Image (spheres, rainbow, N blue to C red):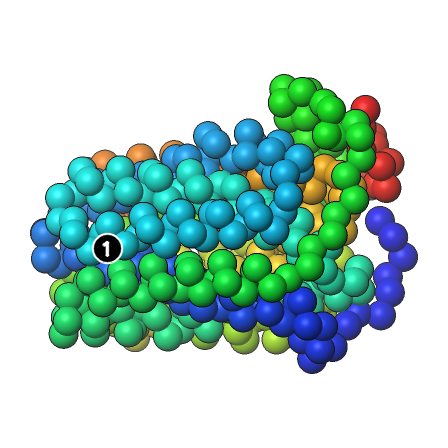
Amino acid sequence: MAAPTAQLTFRDVLKIREVRRLWIAQLVSIFGDFLAIFAVLSLVTFQLHGTPTQVSMILVAYMLPLAVVSPLAGVFVDKWNVKWTMIASDLVRGVLVLVLVFVRDINTIYVIFLALSTVSSFFVPAQSVAVRALAPAAGLMAVNGLMSQAVQGSQIISPAIAGLLVQWFGANACFLFDSLSFFFSAGMVMTLSIHRAMSPATAASSVLSSMRQGFSFIFSHTVISFVILAMTAGMFAVRCFGALMSVYVRDILHSNAALFGTLNSLIGVGMIVGTQLLHRVASRVPKQFLVIYGLGGMGAAVLFTALFGRVATTAIGMTGLGFGAAFIMVPSQTLVQQETPHALLGRVASSLMSLLAMSQVLAMFVAGPVAQNLGIRNLYLGSAAMLGVIGAIGYAWLRKPKENAWPETSPPT
């Protein structure tokens, strides 16, 4: 890794016009996404009286294309114009979300979420490339922190708003806002000037060859491979916890959609607190160790929630879950952007997204049946144990010095 350099602050990077506009676009779009997702979960859980398996299958439908399509999407992102890839993705997703206004059949909801996720498979790696292109190297940590703050702020506000909107006006109000947010994001991205140099080898290489280069880099680079594998395994345990939170609220806490939204908002509170602390300690602690500490913190939060089963203890656990998540997501995204050659970034980012989505799909296939047969609290205890084991193994692995097989400044050939 390169020698540490002085890191730019949030204020510094927001002075960059292109970064500021990209951040605003994502802030609005992410807020709309949370409204729509929580509206669907609330609709299926509290109005359609969905079973745990039906609720978890909604998230499976969303995650499955991210797992399957993403590696292929990353290849094309590395070949296509990044700006127009993002714009097209936003416009298509805006139309797809609008269709939810007219749908109340759960199978049709599954199909729409499959389509949304397929399009998102192209947008997410393109955005990662855009961040790398627009932000100076010393500002990557701050920009990723800002993007994370957009998620955190939305997670604080949107779940509670979604719960109330669903109760007062119905789910359609959330779907309409999410659709408009995608069109707004497309308009903002259209104003950006994103310049990325593309090597002739990247443009000319075949799809299979390009995919092979991306995976070869990932699994031969010590830091990147650790971060991806740790996040993948950790996300499996976390998704077992999160996929059925609405059912936990209904069956264990005996409450409603409004409490479900409020509890999820506390994840955002924890993430904001964690991100602020993270910005202070990142210069003293290697980013890969921050990921380990985040896994441990999330495991403790899930355990605390499962042991007591009260509204107050669940609120504390959700806050702790967000705090730990900040220590995983921001350092991991920054490491991927810093350590990956620019020509490979779309493929590496999409491969990370694919592996994370695959672990979540597997978790959600497991979560529903396990919760129905063994109880949701036992499922949560298992998730906490898995997070603790992953953190301990990762800590022992990172203490051993390793060499990277590929140079960090050029892609494998």
Q: Position of residue 328 (x, y in %)?
A: 58, 56
Would you name the residue on which mark 1 appears? 40
* Looking at the image, residue 233 lies above or below residue 284: above
What residue sits 47% from the left and 47% below the top? 89
Left or right: 4, with 295 as reference point? right
Quarter of the image holding residue 364? top left
Q: Nearer the viewer, residue 94 or 406?
A: 94
Pinpoint residue 224: horizontal percent, then vertical percent: 70, 41
Q: Could you tell whether 44 is left or right of 223 in the image?
A: left
Residue 68 in percent (x, y) is at: 46, 30
- The part of the image, by quadrant, that contains residue 319 is bottom left
Q: Secondary structure at mark 1?
A: helix
Can I make out residue 189 in this image?
yes
Q: Nearer the viewer, residue 380 or 171?
A: 171
Few, some or many C-alpha atoms within 10 Å of disc 1 (few <14, some 14-19, many ≥20)? many
Residue type marked 1? Val
Q: Is residue 93 above or below residue 115?
A: below
Q: Position of residue 117 (x, y in %)?
A: 40, 42
Residue appearing at x 19%, y 62% in the figure: 171
**Left or right of 82, for residue 165:** left
Q: Quadrant of the C terminus?
A: top right
Q: Nearer the viewer, residue 186 or 152?
A: 186
Up-down: is 273 above or below 79?
A: below
Q: Is residue 293 visible?
A: no
Please name the residue shown 22% across and 67% down the image: 173
Q: What is the tally of numbered marks visible in this picture?
A: 1
> Residue, x 55% and y 34% (percent of image)?
73
